[in-house]
Image (cartoon, helix red, strand yellow):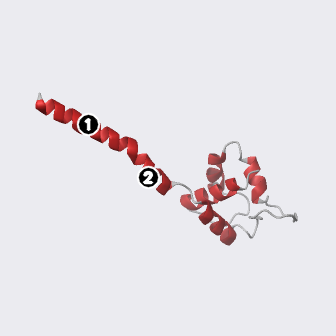
Amino acid sequence: MQRSAHAKESGLQLFRLCLLLPMFVAPALAADAENGKRVAEARCVTCHMVAPSPRREVADAPPFDVIARKFQVQPETLAFAILDPHPRMNVALTRREAEDIAAYINTLAR
């Protein structure tokens, strides 16, 4: 009987740990908008206007604030769209960089 109670308590402790784990792991895995801005300024600025600007320049690539509004309904799909190469994109990004850039772009949605 005591063995069964001990096993039950161990199982309950494991269950509690599993419930708490996402609270500590999720922030560590969350996309970093500040890093996304830095990566975008270094690697995307040749084609895109990466920061909001009052003046509109004519370019083939849409500004990031326009992209943000396009993906506003489903912002989580933006990282996948960034990873899917588009015409003339000669930039190799890691999944983490794409997620960070997407997080930055999503901050521009109005």
Relative image position of residue 46 (x, y in whole percent):
74, 70
Q: Distance between the residues labelled 1 and 2?
A: 21 Å
Q: Mark 2 points at which residue?
A: 25
Quadrant of the image for the N terminus? top left
Q: Is residue 35 left or right of residue 73?
A: left
> Which residue is located at x 43 percent, y 52 percent?
25
Q: Residues within 10 Å of mark 1 (few under 14, many from 20)?
A: few
Q: What residue type is labelled 1?
A: Gly
> Which residue is located at x 71 percent, y 47 percent?
71
Q: Is mark 1 on a helix, strand or loop?
A: helix
> Which residue is located at x 17 percent, y 35 percent?
6
Give whichever of 103, 85 is nearer the camera. 103
Is 14 above or below relative to 41?
A: above
Q: In this view, does 40 lie to the left or right of 11?
A: right
Give whichever of 91, 109 is nearer the camera. 109
Q: Is mark 2 on a helix, strand or loop?
A: helix
> Which residue is located at x 77 percent, y 56 percent?
65
Q: Is residue 16 left or right of residue 29?
A: left
Is 76 above or below relative to 42?
A: above
Give whichever of 68, 2 is nearer the camera. 2
Q: Residues within 10 Å of mark 2 (few under 14, many from 20)?
A: few
Q: Earlier in the sequence, mark 1 or mark 2?
A: 1
Rendered image: mark on residue 34:
none
Relative image position of residue 77 (x, y in whole percent):
64, 47
Relative image position of residue 92 (x, y in whole percent):
61, 65
Q: Is residue 58 left or right of residue 96?
A: right
Q: What residue type is labelled 2?
A: Val
Location of residue 18 (image quadrant): top left
Q: Name the residue under label 1.
A: 11
Location of residue 7 (image quadrant): top left
Total of numbered circles in the picture? 2
